[in-house]
Image (spheres, rainbow, N blue to C red):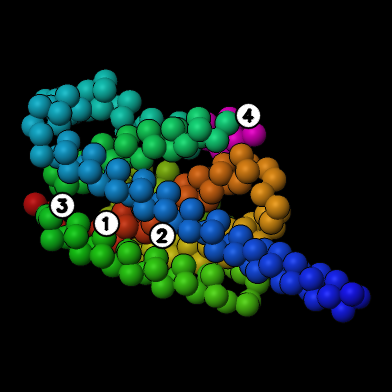
Amino acid sequence: MDNYNSQQQFSDYTVVESGARAIPKKFMANVFLWMFAALAISALCAYYFATTPSLIESLVGERGLTGLGKIVLFAPLGFVLLMSFGYTRLSAPILTLLFVLYAALTGISLSFILLVYTSSSVIGCFASASAMFGIMAVMGYTTDKDLTSFGRIMTMGLIGIIIAMVINFFLHSAQMDYIISIIGVAVFTGLTAYDVQKLKRIGEGINPDGTALENTKKMAIMGALTLYLDFLNMFLFLLRLFGNRK
């Protein structure tokens, strides 16, 4: 009987341990699923607006951006801030809705890119960003090396890029813009590996018994937002470097 109980306990332990190992994979699968869904929504909205003259005219007039165009341009930043600072107070369904709306608005704002750059440039840079993102995501997920210090360096680089872009907004230096784009590609490439590893560790910390399911869903959405921003910025900086204008 004791031997049977020992075997039963070992069997139960094995099932629990197997389930615990499956948690990070399931969490990361949800993160990437939401990220890819957001990219698809953005791509569809960008294409639809870019190929519909009446919609583009509602965003851009003879004197530049219309009132609606300015809202569309700056609204995504507001959504990111709302999701980030309101994370603890927002429910999972509301956070998900905000993420979907954010992806749609970002796609609409990206419709201008399809009007400025050639289709081959957009497709080529998107494919390059996808390959780079995929490689770094795999590295971040599989490496045993702690990327925390590396992530801090990348974050400092990101802050430097933001400051440089604000300065160059007034200087209008083409050379500085080129340098910023190169550094931008490097920073967001590195951040991809760091963020994937960070999300993997978040998944490993999730309780296997399924408690706090609401919070897990919210973490998956915020993780998807993080990776979405990494990919999007990598793509935009590549486009600034190698894109051919019409």
Mark 3 surroundings within 10 Å by alpha-carbon count, few (fewer than 14), some (14 through 19), many (20 or more): some
Q: What's the CA distance linking mark 3 and mark 4?
A: 40 Å
Q: Which residue is mark 4?
A: 89
Q: What's the CA distance linking mark 1 and mark 2?
A: 10 Å
Q: Earlier in the sequence, mark 4 or mark 2?
A: 4
Q: Of tags 1 and 4, which is closer to the observer? A: 4
Q: Which residue is mark 2?
A: 184
Judge whether 189 appears above or below 98 on screen: below
Q: Earlier in the sequence, mark 1 or mark 4?
A: 4
Q: Of tags 3 and 1, which is closer to the observer? A: 3
Q: Earlier in the sequence, mark 3 or mark 1?
A: 3
Q: Which residue is mark 3?
A: 117
- Residue 238, percent from left and from top: 30, 61
Judge whether 148 appears above or below 3 on screen: above
Q: Earlier in the sequence, mark 1 or mark 2?
A: 2
* Marks 3 & 4, CB-CB < 8 Å contact: no
Q: Earlier in the sequence, mark 3 or mark 4?
A: 4
